[in-house]
């Protein structure tokens, strides 16, 4: 059940941000400098962006350590997931992989 919830979270965490990214790209093209400057356009955007960037970095470190401890295969998928979509995909994706690993360990053991 949790595995399905995490899968749904990963799908929504991809589709919803890309709806907004797509809107930005359709209006401005693939303008990376403008995209980055827009992340820090005002205090609210800068605070939110800093929060998410710090959280993503902490998540990478935690998930790496957790993956080593729990033998979660394909942990590294969270890095490109974070860089191409964001934490909204990477976090549920990792939890899905972790849950999938737990299910496999129960079946084997």
Image: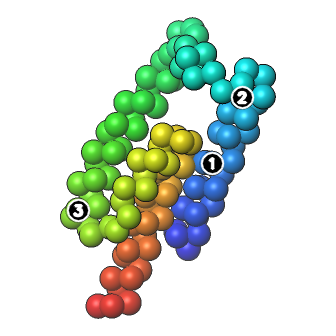
Q: Is residue 106 shown above or below 100?
A: below
Q: Give the class, few, some or many, for how many residues have Cα within 10 Å of label 1's Cα (few <14, many ≥20).
A: some
Identify the element where label 1 is drawn.
helix
Q: Secondary structure at mark 3?
A: helix
Q: Position of residue 99 (x, y in %)?
A: 43, 70
Task: Name the quadrant of the C terminus.
Answer: bottom left
Of tags 2 and 3, the one toward the viewer is 2
Residue 91's spot in the image, x, y percent?
Answer: 46, 50
Residue at x 54%, y 49% (from the top left corner): 89
The answer to whether residue 96 shows anywhere in this view is yes
Q: Nearer the viewer, residue 54 or 28?
A: 28
Which residue does the image show at 23% across and 54% down from the upper left?
65
Viewed as shown, does residue 21 lie left or right of 48? right
Structural distance between the alpha carbons of marks 2 and 3? 37 Å
Give the residue at mark 1.
14
Spot the residue most to the front: 30
Against 41, residue 72 (above or below) is: below
Residue position marked by numbered label 2 in the rendering:
25
Camera-nearest label, 1 or 2: 2
Q: Is residue 12 left or right of residue 100?
A: right
Which numbered disc, 2 or 3, marks the residue that appears first in the sequence? 2
| Residue 76 or residue 62, whichever sits in front | 76
User: Could you tell me if residue 20 is visible in this image?
Assistant: no
* Contact between labelled residues 3 and 1, with CB atoms less than 8 Å apart: no
Q: Residue at x 38, y 64 (%)?
A: 74
Q: Position of residue 6 (x, y in %)?
A: 54, 61
Task: Name the quadrant of the N terminus.
Answer: bottom right
Q: Is residue 63 above or below residue 109?
A: above
Residue labelled with disc 3: 68
Q: CA distance from mark 1 to mark 3?
A: 26 Å
């Amino acid at each position: 059940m949790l595995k399905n919830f995490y899968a749904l979270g990963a799908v929504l965490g991809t589709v919803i941000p890309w709806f907004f990214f797509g809107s930005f790209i359709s209006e401005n093209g693939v303008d990376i400098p403008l995209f980055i400057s827009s992340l820090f356009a005002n205090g609210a955007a800068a605070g939110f962006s800093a929060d998410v960037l710090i959280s993503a970095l902490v998540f990478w470190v935690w998930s790496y350590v957790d993956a080593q401890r729990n033998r979660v295969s394909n942990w590294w998928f969270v890095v490109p997931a974070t860089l191409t979509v964001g934490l909204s995909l990477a976090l549920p994706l990792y939890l899905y992989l972790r849950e999938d690993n737990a299910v496999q360990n129960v079946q084997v053991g």
